[in-house]
Amino acid sequence: MENVKITLVRSLIARKPAQVKTAKTLGLKRPGDSIVLPNDAATKGKINAISHLVSVETV
């Protein structure tokens, strides 16, 4: 299974609480933070919820 690198590129300030919680669940706290996670259904759903705040690369 391949992995994805998720990077927070936009700030979480003035975002809906659900979007902030989703970013925190992924381990992203501030712009520039990155994390590598497996590319599974749960990760894809979280990425979809905050797609306008993150950039995604296949690793």
Image: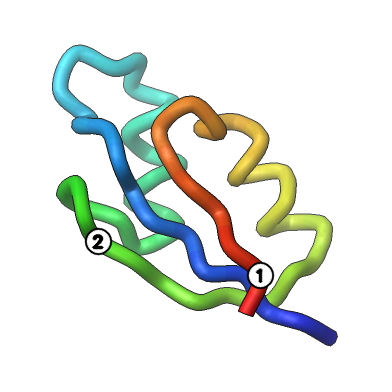
To which quarter of the image does residue 2 belong? bottom right
- Is the residue marked by circle 2 packed among few (<14), some (14-19), or many (20+) residues within 10 Å? few
Q: Position of residue 19 (x, y in %)?
A: 42, 28
**Of the two numbered discs 2 and 1 in the rendering, the one whose residue sits closer to the viewer:** 1
Amino acid at dot 2: Asp
Identify the element where label 2 is drawn.
loop
Q: Specify the label residue 30 is tagged with.
A: none
Q: Position of residue 23 (x, y in %)?
A: 38, 45
40 displayed left or right of 25: right
8 displayed left or right of 58: left
Is 55 located above or below residue 43 in the figure? above
Residue at 33% of width from left, 22% of height from top? 17
Q: Position of residue 45 (x, y in %)?
A: 72, 43
Is 17 located above or below residue 57 in the figure? above
Residue at 79% of width from left, 66% of height from top? 40
Amino acid at dot 1: Thr
Residue at 61% of width from left, 45% of height from top? 46
Q: Nearer the viewer, residue 10 or 21?
A: 10
- Quarter the C terminus occupies: bottom right
Residue at the bottom extreme?
1
Give the Cα separation between the discs numbered 2 and 1. 16 Å
- Is the residue marked by circle 1 packed among few (<14), some (14-19), or many (20+) residues within 10 Å? few
Residue at 20% of width from left, 31% of height from top? 11
Q: Which residue is the site of mark 2? A: 33
Q: Specify the label residue 58 is tagged with.
A: 1
To which quarter of the image does residue 53 belong? top left
- Please tell me which of labels 2 and 1 falls first in the chain: 2
Is 44 located above or below residue 5 in the figure? above
